[in-house]
Amino acid sequence: MGEQPAARQGGAEKDLGQDRAHSARMYDYYLGGKTNYAVDREAAQAVIRVFPAIEVTARVNRAYMQRAARYLARRGVRQFIDLGTGIPTVPNLHQVVQEEVPEAAVVYADNDPIVLVYADELLDGTPEGTTCYLEADVTQPDKVLEAIDASGTIDFGRPVALSMHALLHFVPDDKDPCGIVSRLMAALAPGSYLSLTHCTGDFEPEAWQAIVDTYRQRGTAAQVRSHAEVLRLFAGLELLDPGLVSAHRWHPGPHGPAPLTDGQVSLYAGVARKD
């Protein structure tokens, strides 16, 4: 990549972790992006060797994000929180929703300092709208909420769409992912929504165990979950039609889902409403 960028926050240079693989940069590689290092590419290639369809999984996740964001904007949502944003990839969530609703407000948050380097690409919203980027860790939901509140971007008295796409499979059970989702949703007004995707080993268990091992061996906690386990993340919320399904089958559009198998996708997706 040539000279490496440095992230600065509060005047201090931050460690970008170029010496260790990071899930956000590996995801960028799966999508064909350039914001990754040799260590990320090596780890990503190790995953591709055991599950070549991982690039399909990444593309399907991205396509689902766009459909879900547009769907929620058309349902009247004007505020969005995107946790686990990752490396900017056009179209980003704010570009999708502000195309539908120019005045929409979007907060992005991620714990990878390299995302901060490229955060300008997340802030090029419409003149009527607002976009903001925060460095925050989803495993500390109270701090996430405090940072969002301090930004002044979100009115917690009005409905919000919370996006947690391809994020919670990096939050193992000992970090209480169900509790994290519950705490975040508790802070949002009635009429808010949760949009979530999560990788699963239901269809290709051996391959996904190998993927989990690859991430763990390189220092990234990972845990795929079954349909029943992912469903528990929506506890207390009303899942909207068609429920929790393989991501390419969620409102696929007029031409139907892409000609993919559930095993190739290995990703569950759903949108739920808070009453």
Image (tube, rainbow, N blue to C red):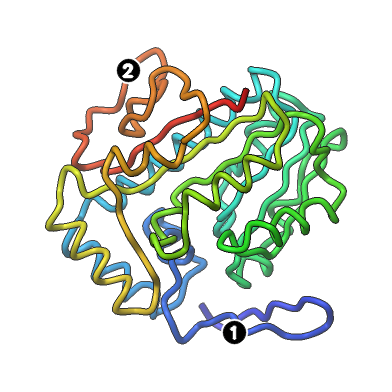
**Nearest to the observer: residue 144 or residue 48:** 144
- Quadrant for residue 185, please give it: top right
Residue 199 percent across, percent down from the top left: 33, 48
Q: Which residue is mark 2?
A: 256
Q: Is residue 78 left or right of residue 255?
A: right
Q: Secondary structure at mark 1?
A: loop
Depicted 174 relative to depicted 75: above or below? below
Q: Is residue 132 left or right of residue 53?
A: right
Q: Nearer the viewer, mark 1 or mark 2?
A: 2
Q: Quadrant of the C terminus?
A: top right
Q: Secondary structure at mark 2?
A: loop
Residue 41 percent across, percent down from the top left: 36, 72
Q: Which residue is mark 1?
A: 3
Residue occupying the point 74% across, 34% down: 79
Q: Amino acid at mark 2?
A: Gly
> Most extreme residue toward the left, as rendered?
206
> Most extreme residue toward the top, as rendered?
254
Residue occupying the point 41% across, 65% down: 174
Numbered label attached to residue 20 = none
| Other-residue count near label 1 (Cα within 10 Å), few / some / many at <14 / 14–19 / ≥20 | few
Q: Earlier in the sequence, mark 1 or mark 2?
A: 1
Depicted 266 relative to depicted 11: above or below? above
Residue occupying the point 80% across, 42% down: 154
**Nearest to the observer: residue 101 or residue 139:** 139
